[in-house]
Image: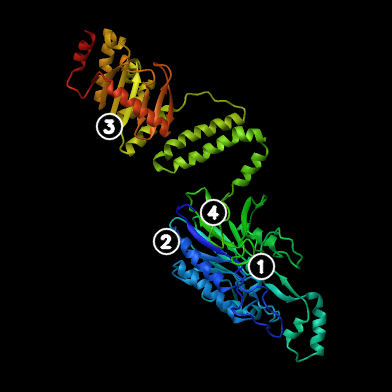
């Protein structure tokens, strides 16, 4: 995992803590876990996890822990189950140096419910709610099931996050309604018999549901920063690929729940339950919304056991989060999975791409998309933002025109962009170095206010930093009297603009040395092309290899100079000496 600014979350699920010792029976029932969770496995994980954290600075340690249900195996029939789960979470909080155990967010799973305490919610969830009082969890109040919502935007600068916890095993452990009439008759005939014994004679169902009470508590984000929103529950909201014959495969009101979450701008749903690590993006075309649904593996059970580190990113990142997968030994399990927040634009990109042939996608679309990606990386440096924005607007306009079978023939907006580029160098307190060949007429025309050269030279005239110009000249400009007078006029005007000027005879150079270019600050290479007396094209390169060659060529030209304005020799004396 790269050390970039993020709010890091540890996501674990399906711990399935068992009693520390095997019990033969509870309440006369054989409720013995199929497998006991050995304490040495738990302690080894804690030791490995502490070593895992050492590779990061503490600023990048997880700031919160999310547990998506099934803390225990048999609903707390044995108090030792929840006690072990509580101790484990407390040790995690210490390892992560969490300031408060409320930073651990827990939701109940179907294994956390006591299936043998009747149909009353309060009775069946009593052991769970008693066990998680130290942590953050949804609750059961006098008004019913109550979700837990927390704004965590103050944990890491410039990262807005909200987390909402839900109860899904609402009807786990209820009797089959098809035998309700039989139960009623048994109660009448066997008055005085404990209800648990009556219910125990009938099949119990595992029904997951969120319910209208919890859904209506979901509110739109109040944070004006458009926060990342994460919903947490135990049961999955989408079908799992595991083949299992069971009464109810997923949350019975999953469709309604997903609609409400997407309508309220939730980005990610975290679940557990099936122990299968799985990520699915769900799209709602009518609502123009999308949501990522992630099912975590069991931390301690089954072949794919492990955990997930979720990096929540700020607005500077192209992704709202990245999922990092690890096995129980804290080794990377799969490549990191970035999650794009298509606020939602990615579905539209997919729809457009579907109408483009594979060949055109590869030859046209991918290069354009790569350019967009590289452009966004460059403009993150504030100094370049305004400069590249104008360039990209022109490119976007040209692409749009081509797509509509229209062409626009115009001179490039080189003067405006040149001015922006020079301003960047000014802001960075860097210098400008220019070399040009045989263009005396062009620079003489700069004295005419409406000329192309005047537009070009105005930005240079206003530049307050160090400015150096090399004039590369053929022999005629150094020996012909008329051309010599032009050269003297150009050089004097440049000196008045605070340029340091040097003259380099062409015969002092070689063909492999560039003679018409500029180095802007230490970041851009300008290459001038076109006719000497008319608008010239301007190519800009920010490529480091191009810049290295330009610096070498500049040094070669400077060392080949025959005269420069910092010397003691007057320019007229130089021409007299050079000519005669």
Residue 132 placement: quadrant: bottom right
Dot 4 and dot 1 residues touching (CB under 8 Å)? no
Which quadrant does the C terminus fall into?
top left
Label ID, residue 466: 3
Q: CA distance from mark 4 to mark 2?
A: 19 Å
Tell me residue 241's x, y (percent): 71, 58
Tell me which label, 4 or 1, sits earlier in the chain: 1
Total marks in image: 4
Q: CA distance from mark 4 to mark 1?
A: 27 Å
Tell me residue 273's x, y (percent): 65, 66
Vertical order, 205 against 520 (above or below)? below
Tell me which label, 4 or 3, sits earlier in the chain: 4
Q: CA distance from mark 4 to mark 3?
A: 45 Å
Q: Could you tell me which secondary element the residue under label 1 belongs to?
A: loop
Tell me which label, 1 or 3, sits earlier in the chain: 1
Q: Residues within 10 Å of mark 3 (few under 14, many from 20)?
A: some
* Residue 267 falls left or right of residue 391: right
């Amino acid at each position: 995992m790269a050390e970039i600014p993020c709010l890091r979350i540890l996501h674990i699920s399906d711990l399935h803590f068992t009693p520390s010792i095997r019990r033969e029976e509870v309440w006369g029932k054989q409720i013995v876990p199929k497998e006991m969770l050995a304490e040495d496995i738990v302690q080894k994980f804690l030791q490995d996890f502490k070593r895992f954290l050492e590779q990061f600075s503490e600023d990048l340690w997880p700031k919160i822990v999310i547990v998506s249900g099934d803390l225990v195996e048999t609903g707390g029939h044995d108090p030792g189950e929840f006690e072990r789960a509580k101790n484990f979470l407390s040790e995690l909080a210490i390892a992560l140096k969490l300031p408060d155990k409320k930073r651990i967010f827990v939701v109940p799973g179907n294994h956390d419910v006591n299936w043998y305490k009747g149909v009353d919610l309060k009775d069946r969830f009593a052991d769970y709610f008693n066990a998680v009082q130290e942590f953050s969890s949804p609750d059961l109040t006098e008004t019913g099931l109550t979700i837990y919502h927390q704004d965590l935007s103050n944990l890491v600068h410039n990262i807005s996050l909200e987390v909402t916890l839900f109860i899904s095993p609402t009807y786990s452990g209820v009797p089959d309604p098809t035998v309700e009439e039989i139960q009623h008759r048994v109660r009448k005939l066997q008055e005085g018999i404990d209800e648990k014994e009556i219910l125990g004679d009938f099949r119990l169902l595992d029904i997951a549901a969120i319910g209208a009470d919890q859904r209506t508590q979901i509110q739109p984000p109040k944070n004006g920063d458009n926060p990342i929103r994460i919903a947490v529950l135990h049961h999955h909201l989408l079908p799992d690929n595991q083949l299992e014959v069971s009464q109810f495969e997923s949350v019975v009101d999953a469709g309604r729940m997903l609609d409400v979450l997407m309508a309220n701008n939730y980005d990610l749903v975290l679940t557990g339950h099936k122990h299968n690590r799985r990520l699915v993006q769900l799209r709602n075309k009518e609502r123009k919304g999308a949501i990522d649904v992630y099912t975590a593996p069991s931390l301690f059970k089954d072949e794919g056991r492990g955990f997930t580190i979720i990096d929540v990113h700020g607005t500077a990142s192209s992704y709202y989060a990245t999922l990092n997968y690890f096995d129980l030994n804290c080794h990377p399990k799969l490549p990191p999975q970035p999650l794009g927040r298509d606020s939602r634009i990615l579905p539209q990109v997919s729809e457009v791409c579907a109408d483009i042939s594979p060949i055109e996608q590869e030859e046209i679309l991918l290069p354009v998309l790569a350019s967009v990606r590289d452009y966004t990386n460059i403009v993150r440096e504030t100094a370049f933002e305004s400069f590249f924005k104008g360039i990209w607007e022109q490119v976007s306009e040209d692409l749009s025109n081509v797509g509509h079978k229209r062409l626009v023939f115009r001179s490039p907006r080189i003067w405006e962009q040149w001015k922006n580029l020079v301003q960047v160098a000014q802001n960075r307190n860097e210098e400008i170095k220019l070399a040009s060949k045989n263009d005396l007429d062009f620079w003489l025309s700069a004295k005419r206010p409406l000329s192309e050269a005047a537009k070009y030279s105005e930005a240079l005239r206003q530049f307050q930093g160090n400015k150096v110009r090399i004039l590369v000249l053929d022999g005629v400009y150094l020996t012909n009297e008329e051309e010599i007078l032009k050269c003297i006029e150009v050089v004097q005007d440049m000196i008045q603009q605070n340029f340091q000027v040097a003259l380099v005879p062409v015969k002092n150079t070689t063909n492999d040395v560039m003679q018409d270019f500029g180095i802007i600050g230490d970041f851009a290479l300008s290459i001038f092309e076109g006719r000497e007396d008319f608008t010239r094209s301007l190519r800009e390169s920010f490529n480091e290899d191009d810049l290295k060659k330009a610096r070498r060529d500049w040094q070669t030209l400077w060392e080949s100079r025959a005269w420069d304005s910092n010397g003691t020799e007057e320019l007229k004396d130089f021409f007299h000496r050079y000519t005669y």
